[in-house]
Amino acid sequence: MTDEPTPQRRILLRSGKSPFDVASLEQSLDRDVFATNAGNLIFSDAAHKILTTPRAAVFSNGIRTDPSAAARINEEFDVFVVPLANAFRPTFERPLRRMTQLIKKLRIPVVVLGVGAQADLQYNASRLKPMEATVREFVTQVLNRSASIGVRGEFTEQYLKSMGFRDVEVIGCPSMFMNGETFSLEKKAESLTAESRISVNGSHSAVRSHGLDAIIRQAHERYPHLRFVGQNLLEAQLLHWRETSNPIGAQTSMPTHPSHPMYREGKVRLYVDPATWIEELRAFDFSFGSRIHGNIAALLAGVPSTVLCSDSRTLELCRYFGIPHRKISETPANTDPAELYEAADFGELVNGHKERFLRFTGFMERNGLENTFHHGDSGKAFDAQMSKLALPPAVRPWTESDPDSLSSRFSWMQSRMDELAAQNAVLRGQLEKKGAGPVRLRVQTSEGTAARPSAYRRARRVVGGPVRKLLRPEQ
């Protein structure tokens, strides 16, 4: 008599895409696979790897939050794992409500693998008061389906405990545990020089409101090999299409804007896959900036990094993990990256990593989750599968010397126009069958209704200007 194999648990993971989902740059941007911020994929890919064991298979939900899908999820999956970033913030209240509506209908366990509250650097939670009822209901529904809720740091722990919740555990972010209990890091050189390769990152708000633009500008003058790594969807659109419909994209002080010197010099990148992001950073000597996951990507690549914190979400993570950091409000505009490099001490980060890892995996076990490092092959199969994938390259600036990449852009646009034309033909046919007669799609304008432009004309409006600029002969 033989033992029957134990059936695999099916884990549904909230993530923009599976790490093994390979798509072109055009498809990735069209689908917004990283939910507006590529940093989200750093921690969701790490969670996918950590959760994959011989007894568990992991599936991405495509970041969708659809309460009507609860019955299917209950039927097909054994647990819903939800890695989150700064979800407790006013601009995320509506998505948080939808997620709560879904969780209410789930009969399976729901495990939150790290969530953060966003406030200022003084940890003042007053701006979160109007959404307290939403947060309370979300946490209550999660704790009805799990042993505890995992939060990213001290501020979020204090915030939830002040609301009366007790089953709150500080576990940091899954991204830092992508490689298990060991974490090694050392400076490649005693100091930075003009020949050093430096990566810088930053949000629009840090550049616009906190003076990061001045620091980047001076670093660009001092270090010829400086590179800016963007993260937002609108930045990717500016790099790949030279235009974006988002008005924030008009900020010319961002290196991702076509008028910025770093853009014109081709010194800007954005990655739609963490594996490519981390691999390309290995060649750098130092990373700094206001993006927490932009710098975590560098740390995972073995590159010394310093975070310039602009709010509680980055500050609490840096404090928890011992990541070198400074408050951006206390960082002079003339700060040289060499100063940040010299001051960076990684002792706490490296020496305390194993204890933090065991705390993280302990939280998982208390919530019924195994991990690949204690219950699997330490991620070897995951890494082997990733190494076989032909992932797309980084999104780069659309410059006049880049004709090869135009081919893929135009090919994708042509296919999309063909798809739209076919969809329009089907819709027209369906309407005409219902007796509506010949149909010409119309749109509402400020002056009334007008005929809807063809897919070709709509595409021309988006990229026509940049194409004409690109093809215009030099004066």
Image (cartoon, rainbow, N blue to C red):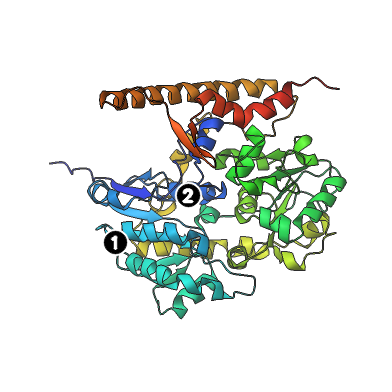
Q: Quadrant of residue 2?
A: top left
Residue 211 drawn at (x, y percent): 77, 59
Q: Quadrant of the N terminus?
A: top left
* For marks 1 and 2 on the same chain, the one whose residue lies earlier in the sequence: 2
In the picture, measured across the screen, residue 162 lies left or right of residue 68, that is right
The one nearer the camera, 390 or 433, is: 433
Mark number for residue 44? 2
In the picture, measured across the screen, residue 111 lies left or right of residue 354, that is left
Which residue is found at the position 78% from the left and 63% from the top?
343
Query: Badge 1 is on which residue?
Result: 104
Residue 99 drawn at (x, y percent): 37, 57
Which residue is found at the position 23% from the left and 50% from the top?
71
Residue 239 drawn at (x, y percent): 66, 36
Q: Look at the picture and state if 430 lies above or below 190.
A: above
Give amino acid for label 2: Ser
Q: Quadrant of residue 125?
A: bottom right
- Decide if residue 60 is in sight here: yes
In the picture, measured across the screen, residue 123 lies left or right of residue 435, that is right
Which residue is found at the position 85% from the left and 51% from the top?
218
The one nearer the camera, 47 or 98, is: 98
The tally of labels here is: 2
Q: Residue furthest front?
A: 447
| Residue mark closest to the camera, 1 vs 2 | 1
